């Protein structure tokens, strides 16, 4: 309650804007009842200082600090990137599993699988003769595997190839290979050229094909035959015969091809399952779901 | 608080802090030092100070430096503010108010400036100055009475 003893306190609080609405009204009523206090109320109100906004600090630049700009990495289309990364990871994993050594993976030595898998020479023999007599320069008429990148996920188009020559029929014995290497300089040269030919093999020469009849994937090679010029004349041999590999390694190649075919099937199954799946990430309290 | 937010504080509060320091110390050179050291302290403590509290922190540092330190060293000799910054509406009142402000001690002057210039309430002024709310109220009460008496006496003289 405002009295003659505390009215100044109320007037100062009024000047400071600290009175509540009820107190404000009470003060106004008190001043109304005592008009001689109106001048005092006005005097207290005049004690309020007014800031002079024309006075400014002119050395602001000396106070500022250099700002380190944070670089934001553009990651707008992250869904596509995530899908692409997943596919690449799956392909790499499948390839790694497929290229494991056969002796470390007992499943790869299964003869049942090998029976459906052949490594054959090509049906075409574009024998452009070169001076070194052994370089394989033929190119396949149609690649057995092509990669299309039109969509988000790379698709593999497969073509069925006729298996012309089974590996087991064309394989030569290890003993014979060793004798050739040991006794003939020409054979050594041929081996070197064959190694060069291996290095020049394009990826499209080795691919997977689906056996439409049995509905499983098989591995084939589209390697060209090699024409060899010897003292006795010109002979044509399968490219694999000229490879400086022993029988065990060639069987290993069969196993690799088999594993590749198996890996392809698994990869295909995974790819199909991905199309009907989703990935959910939890970041603290936020949940992010990516549906494929 | 990062460098960007700190620079934003400089742009936003340097002028107000300078005006406050000018009135508290009475000299522009001292006010420059106060502003500079206040922002230097803010930069050093930027990890602990939230941007929303930066203004209060700056005025707290400026208050201590311009009032406490100067008072302890007995170096303060208040001079009237430069006369080129008068309000065009009522220049006489502005001049009289500046003279009236010079009648107050350093602490009362700082409290009046925090109240009138920056609009802080009693509680906020208490947080800045380290006083409790009742003390702020009492100091402001005394300061207003002194200012009012000065204004009334000058008015009577005029």
Image (cartoon, rainbow, N blue to C red):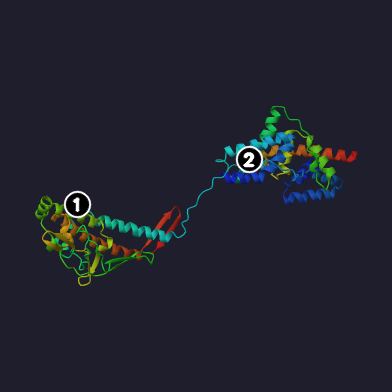
Q: Which mark is residue A104?
A: 1
Q: Residues within 10 Å of mark 2 (few under 14, many from 20)?
A: some
Q: Position of residue B6 (x, y in %)?
A: 60, 44
Image quadrant where residue A281 sits: bottom left
Q: Which residue is mark 2?
A: A63
Residue sitting at x 68%, y 31%: B68
Quadrant hosting residue A220: bottom left
Residue A109, visible in the rendered structure? no
Q: Height in image: A221 above or below B22?
A: below
Measured from the top left, where is residue A6 in percent x and y?
A: 78, 41
Q: Quarter-wise, where is residue B22 in the image?
A: top right
Mark 1 vs mark 2: which is more N-terminal?
2
Q: Seen in the image, is A262 located left or right of residue B62? A: left
User: In terms of depth relative to the viewer, which is nearer, A54 or B58?
Assistant: A54
Mark 1: few/some/many CA within 10 Å (<14, 14-19, 20+): few
Mark 2 — on which chain does it sit? A
- Whether labels 1 and 2 belong to a single chain: the reply is yes
Number of callouts: 2
Q: Is residue B76 left or right of residue A79?
A: right
The chain that hosts pointer 1 is A
Left or right of residue B125: residue B47: left
| Circle 1 SS class | helix
User: Residue B58 or A14: which is nearer the viewer?
Assistant: B58
């Amino acid at each position: 309650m405002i009295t003659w003893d505390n009215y100044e306190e109320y007037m100062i609080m009024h000047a400071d804007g600290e009175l509540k609405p009820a107190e404000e009204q009470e003060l106004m009523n008190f001043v109304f009842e005592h008009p001689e206090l109106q001048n005092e109320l006005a005097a207290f109100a005049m004690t309020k200082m007014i800031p002079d906004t024309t006075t400014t600090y002119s050395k602001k630049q000396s106070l500022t600090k250099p700002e380190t700009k944070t670089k934001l990495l553009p990651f707008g289309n992250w869904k596509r990137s995530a899908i692409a990364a997943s596919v690449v990871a799956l392909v790499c994993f499948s390839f790694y599993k497929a290229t494991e050594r056969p002796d470390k993976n007992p499943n790869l030595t299964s003869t049942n699988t090998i029976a459906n898998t052949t490594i054959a020479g090509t049906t075409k023999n574009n024998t452009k003769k070169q001076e070194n007599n052994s370089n394989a320069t033929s190119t396949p008429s149609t690649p057995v595997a092509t990669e299309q990148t039109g969509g988000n996920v790379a698709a593999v188009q497969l073509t069925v190839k006729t298996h012309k020559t089974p590996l087991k029929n064309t394989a030569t014995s290890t003993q014979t290979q060793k004798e050739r290497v040991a006794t003939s300089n020409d054979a050594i040269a041929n081996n070197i050229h064959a190694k060069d030919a291996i290095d020049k093999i394009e990826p499209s020469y080795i691919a997977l094909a689906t056996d439409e009849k049995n509905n499983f994937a098989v591995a084939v090679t589209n390697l060209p035959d090699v024409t060899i010029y010897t003292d006795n004349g010109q002979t044509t041999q399968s490219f694999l015969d000229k490879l400086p590999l022993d029988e065990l390694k060639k069987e290993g190649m069969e196993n690799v091809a088999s594993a590749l075919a198996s890996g392809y099937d698994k990869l295909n199954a995974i790819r199909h399952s991905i199309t009907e799946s989703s990935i959910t990430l939890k970041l603290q309290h936020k949940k992010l779901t990516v549906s494929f | 608080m990062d460098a960007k937010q700190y620079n934003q504080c400089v742009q936003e509060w340097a002028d107000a802090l300078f005006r406050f320091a000018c009135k508290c110390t009475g000299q522009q050179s001292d006010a420059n030092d106060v502003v500079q050291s206040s922002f230097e302290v803010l930069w050093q403590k930027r990890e602990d100070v939230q941007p929303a509290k930066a203004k209060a922190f700056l005025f707290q540092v400026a208050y201590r430096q311009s009032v406490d330190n100067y008072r302890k060293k007995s170096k303060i000799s208040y001079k009237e503010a430069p006369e080129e910054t008068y309000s065009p509406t009522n220049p006489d009142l502005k001049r009289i108010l500046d003279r009236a402000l010079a009648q107050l001690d350093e602490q009362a002057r700082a409290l009046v400036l925090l109240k009138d210039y920056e609009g802080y309430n009693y509680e906020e002024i208490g947080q800045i100055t380290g006083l409790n709310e009742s003390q702020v109220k009492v100091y402001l009460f005394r300061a207003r009475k002194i200012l009012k008496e000065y204004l009334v006496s000058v008015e009577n003289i005029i």
